[in-house]
Amino acid sequence: MRTVKPSWLGCSPLERWPAPGCTVLTVWRPTACWKAWWSVAAPEGLRRRHAAAAGRAYVSKLEPVTHHALKRRELQRVMSRDAAVMRNAAGLQRLSDTLAEAPIRHVTGRRDFEDVALTLTARAVAAAALARNESRGCHHCTEYPDTAPEHARSTVIRLADDQNLVRAEALATVG
């Protein structure tokens, strides 16, 4: 049996019905290939006319997106060092400071986007760990080796308005 390689749009070409060169997504989900083609290959004039007909402003170039983020290897290193299963307040504070000082990066592709998401997640983990003065589950805090029943609660982690500061808010007690 011959395998069919997906096209550059991620669609698999069909050899027979409905027409040679047609793709699986064209048959089953025509909008998927159309949207991919439209965003990449449609002539600029056509996109401009389409935007005008829809009553939307046409943007020829996207504005650059920047966000604070560590590179993945650096993030893995500091998370392994300071937020492992055995934790202490000094390490968690050092992690929090390192993440707060993360450089501004231009988000130009998937890897950059993932690094931003991973850095935000790491900041949430650090904030949640710093908010608890106890050991909980498999995470052992060396300063607080015991579980505190009064801390058995869900915690919501939120970004502040400036998208840089993380806050931990305790919800109602569980149980």
Image (tube, grey):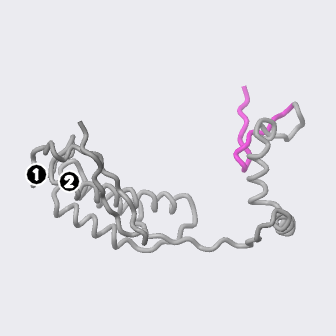
| Res. 130 image quadrant | bottom left
- From mark 2 to mark 1, how far is it between C-alphas? 9 Å
- The quarter in which the C terminus is drawn is top left
Q: Please tell me which residue is depicted at 73% across the width and 30% down the height of the picture.
A: 2
Badge 2 is on which residue?
132
- The answer to whether marks 2 and 1 mark residues whose Cβ atoms lie closer than 8 Å is yes
Q: Nearer the viewer, mark 2 or mark 1?
A: 2
Q: Is residue 170 left or right of residue 72?
A: left
Left or right of residue 84, residue 106 in this image: right
Residue marked by disc 1: 144
- Circle 1 packing at 10 Å, graded few (<14), some (14-19), many (20+), is some
Residue 5 location in percent, x, y? Answer: 71, 40
Residue in the foreground of this view, choosing between 167 and 14: 167
Look at the image and give the residue range highlighted in magenta: 1-16
Pick the front one: 154 or 38: 154
Across and down, in percent, residue 151 comes to 19, 47
Q: In the structure shown, which secondary structural element does the residue marked by tag 1 occupy?
A: loop
At 35% from the left and 61% from the top, the residue drawn is 75
Secondary element under disc 2, as helix, strand or loop, is loop
Farthest-out residue, top = 1
Q: Position of residue 164 (x, y in %)?
A: 39, 69
